[in-house]
Amino acid sequence: MKSTGKASKRNSKTSVENDQDFLVEMEPASSDHEGSEKSLNLRGKRRKKSNDNGMASSSTRRKQHPNAKGGNVRRLESNERERQRMHKLNNAFQALGEAIPHIKTEKKLSKIETLTLAKNYIKSLTAIILGMSSGCLQHAEGVESSHASKLFEHYQQQLEDDGSLSDYLTQIHSFREGS
DNA sequence: TAGGCCATCTGGTCCT
DNA sequence: AGGACCAGATGGCCTA
């Protein structure tokens, strides 16, 4: 995994280089590689020109070359689709983060923070709703009230088990303090 | 400078 | 068959 450390990263080729190797090896039909050019432009945001030494440790990952003619084009198209998919995923993360109230930090929430806060926010809302419905139904007779109270008891037990509600409130507080 | 987080590439697998 | 999804790998940026 990433635990190999930064130093080891320096010894391996970048993906851009892999692309270039790939294009050379696959003898692409067209010289302009509109797909790759597009990709490289997009990459320009974060991905920079590769460094020097090419201990091709990453080359072991590419176990096989596409054997069909135009396979490189398919790969580049696939890369583009994957980028778009990840962009959609990131947009969804952002929307989710914006849906969590009282999080007005200037610092952008990380993905794990977004997921954790969202989970705990949902749990806290559920607790509130269940608490309200339980209170409303306290005076009512019948099955529904017993279901509601059982549900509420179950949820209370869950909260006690993992402390999600208090976690959420603590996180809200800490994020506010941290900003 | 180390570590966290991220974007991207890539090959494998699943699904339609 | 081809696209979607997933996880691993890797390099860049940022911050403490």
Image (cartoon, coloured by chain):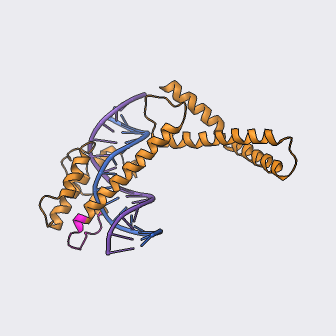
Chain colours: A orange, B blue, C purple
Judge whether residue A102 can be spotted in this image. Answer: yes
Front in this rendered view, residue A126 or A141: A141
Q: Which residue appears farthest toward the left when viewing the image?
A: A31
Whether A26 is among the magenta residues is: no
Along the horizontal axis of the image, is A147 left or right of A169? right
Q: Nearer the viewer, residue B6 or A34?
A: A34
Disc tally is 0
Residue beneath the point at 65% across and 39% down: A125
Residue located 52% across and 26% down the image: A176
Can residue A8 be seen in this snapshot?
A: no
Q: Is residue A53 left or right of residue A103?
A: left
User: In the displayed structure, would residue A13 be above or below residue A133?
Assistant: below
Is residue A113 shown above or below A86? above
Q: Residue at x 61, y 32 (%)?
A: A169
Residue A91 on image: x %, y %: 41, 45
Percent from the top left, x then y, of residue A168? 60, 36
Q: Is residue A131 above or below residue A31?
A: above
Q: Locate residue C2, reporting x and y percent.
A: 32, 69
Report the predominant secondary structure element of the magenta stretch: loop
Of residue A86 and residue A20, the one placed in the foreground of this image is A86
Q: Read off the magenta span.
A: A62-73
* Residue A11 location (% of width, % of height): 25, 50
